[in-house]
DNA sequence: AAATAATTTAATCAAATGATTAAATTATAA
DNA sequence: TTATAATTTAATCATTTGATTAAATTATTT
């Protein structure tokens, strides 16, 4: 849209220009079609198992357009990964930053929101966890940028509360349990369904129940130790 | 060892012969070296991201030997996957089949054993979960073969106990929670360490603590609802 | 020791795959 | 409308990658 070289012009959305030049329905733009196809396949199959040709087919565009708009498979993947990741941690930062809520209320909100989010995006957590293992440093930086202060502050508060005996669980365990109880069933969905014999509807019902149940379980864990008889 | 064709001879351990013909130190045999290298790389990086050349290098053998002993990358992978998977569910079946233990005792044993196992094999759960998503049917069969009756029976007992009001949690949730609490921290280790600021030693300490803590939390969940004021 | 079988090696193949190019088409600007 | 820029297409490249082959080496059997 601006440059003009011997090589194909290049006008990716990551450039600074073209803010709202074209309010084209996002869906219909070629760049967006490629991104959505890439998101679907990368999230489902991971980087290595995804073929650029499959992305092109899924998007219904010519293979060369992928490189025209995104330079390389890797660059496209990086964009998708960042967007996925941001989405994944947004809910946490969002609810935990709300100072008007008590810890219990924050937990209720986060759990409920997350279960809805995971129901709508079932492949995301495994993608995130895998990429986080392959790429711990890059994403670590992203975590900090997104929820840095909130996290540090909240965690410090929890530690104080625990040290003072107001909550009966080490903050590290609290975090592990909160996300273990919330996220794990979605990651382990195939095994769980096999083991429990639940079909898709039943599985979703179970997840809906957990919106209520997880906060109850967590609250029990939060209770300070009994006055030591 | 038996056949002799225009193509290279083929004497894999999956054949019926060679039961103990050579009590060679397992480590030193070429076949075993390939398998161990393959296990390491496949488990770490997954099928698509692993190159047969990398396996050969890791094993310190000629690339052609991989095909000589295992025919193809896929066949080698299938073997590794099955072995990993078997190892992964063995502990469960083992402890849950012990009729002399109470449910609480079984839980204690399984949790403790699993945390040790996951500490020693930190890449296994993510591998299993990924492969299970890519290959749900094949592995579903394997689950049944390994822990079929035990699972069915135990799960039925739990359902009865829950219906009768002896345990205050739906069995499906119990299973989800037990493994969520136990396995998830290992799968999400990079994020958890980042969020909690724990180094490797501290992380391992936390996991050791969970051997005691998880059974306590689970027992609380098991408690029947109060006599309804 | 000689013959046979099994294993290992180096070289090579064919297909898959990410990427590029030049030409054609479409949209935008003058 | 014409000229210019942006987009799209079909063809092609260069590497990578899984797999194979024939020859060399090593082990086993007779």
Image (cartoon, coloured by chain):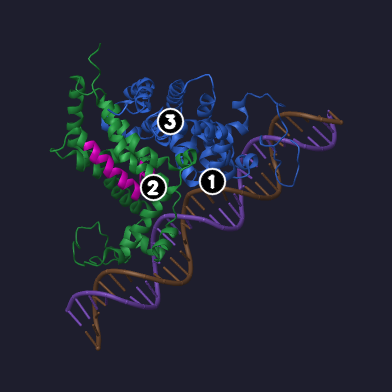
Chain colours: A green, B blue, C purple, D brown
Give x and y (percent) for residue A203: 41, 44
User: Which residue is disc 3 drawn over?
Assistant: B164
User: Which residue is disc 1 drawn over?
Assistant: B137
Q: Quadrant of residue A186 in the image?
A: top left
The circle on residue A123 is: 2
The residue carrying pointer 1 sits among few (fewer than 14), some (14 to 19) or many (20 or more) residues within 10 Å by Cα, namely: few
Q: Secondary structure at mark 2?
A: loop
Q: Quadrant of residue B17 in the image?
A: top right
Q: Say which residue appears at 17% left-offset and 32% top-offset.
A: A153
Does the magenta run of residues contain B56? no
Ranked by sequence position, the earlier of labels 1 and 3 is 1
Give how far apart the Cα atoms at labels 1 and 3 are: 34 Å
Give how far apart the Cα atoms at labels 2 and 1 are: 18 Å
The residue carrying pointer 2 sits among few (fewer than 14), some (14 to 19) or many (20 or more) residues within 10 Å by Cα, namely: some
Q: Nearer the viewer, mark 2 or mark 1?
A: 1
Does the magenta run of residues contain A110? yes
Q: Quadrant of residue A165 in the image?
A: top left
User: What residue span does the magenta drawing correspond to?
Assistant: A106-128
From the image, give the main secondary structure of the stretch colored magenta: helix
Dots 3 and 2 on the same chain: no
Tell which of A195 and D19 is nearer to you.
A195
The residue carrying pointer 3 sits among few (fewer than 14), some (14 to 19) or many (20 or more) residues within 10 Å by Cα, namely: few
* B121 is higher (above) or lower (below) than D23: above
**Extreme residue in the top direction:** A229
Q: Secondary structure at mark 1?
A: helix
């Amino acid at each position: 849209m601006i440059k003009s070289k011997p090589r194909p012009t290049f006008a990716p959305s990551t450039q600074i220009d073209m803010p709202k030049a074209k309010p084209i329905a996002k869906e219909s733009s070629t760049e967006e079609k490629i991104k959505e196809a890439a998101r679907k396949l990368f999230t489902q199959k991971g980087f290595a198992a995804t073929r650029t040709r499959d992305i092109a087919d899924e998007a219904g565009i010519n293979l060369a357009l992928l490189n025209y708009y995104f330079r390389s498979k890797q660059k496209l993947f990086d964009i998708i990964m960042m967007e996925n990741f941001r989405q994944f941690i947004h809910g946490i930062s969002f609810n935990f930053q709300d100072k008007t809520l008590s810890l219990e209320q924050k937990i209720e909100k986060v759990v409920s929101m997350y279960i809805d989010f995971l129901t709508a995006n079932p492949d995301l957590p495994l993608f995130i966890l895998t990429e986080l293992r392959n790429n711990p440093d890059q994403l670590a930086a992203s975590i900090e940028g997104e929820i840095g202060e909130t996290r540090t502050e909240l965690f410090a508060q929890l530690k104080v509360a625990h040290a003072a005996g107001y909550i009966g669980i080490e903050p590290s365990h609290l975090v592990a349990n909160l996300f273990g109880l919330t996220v794990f069933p979605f990651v382990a969905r195939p095994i769980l369904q096999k083991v429990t014999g639940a079909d898709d509807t039943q599985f979703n019902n179970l997840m809906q129940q957990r919106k209520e149940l997880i906060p109850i379980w967590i609250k029990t864990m939060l209770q300070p130790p009994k006055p030591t008889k």
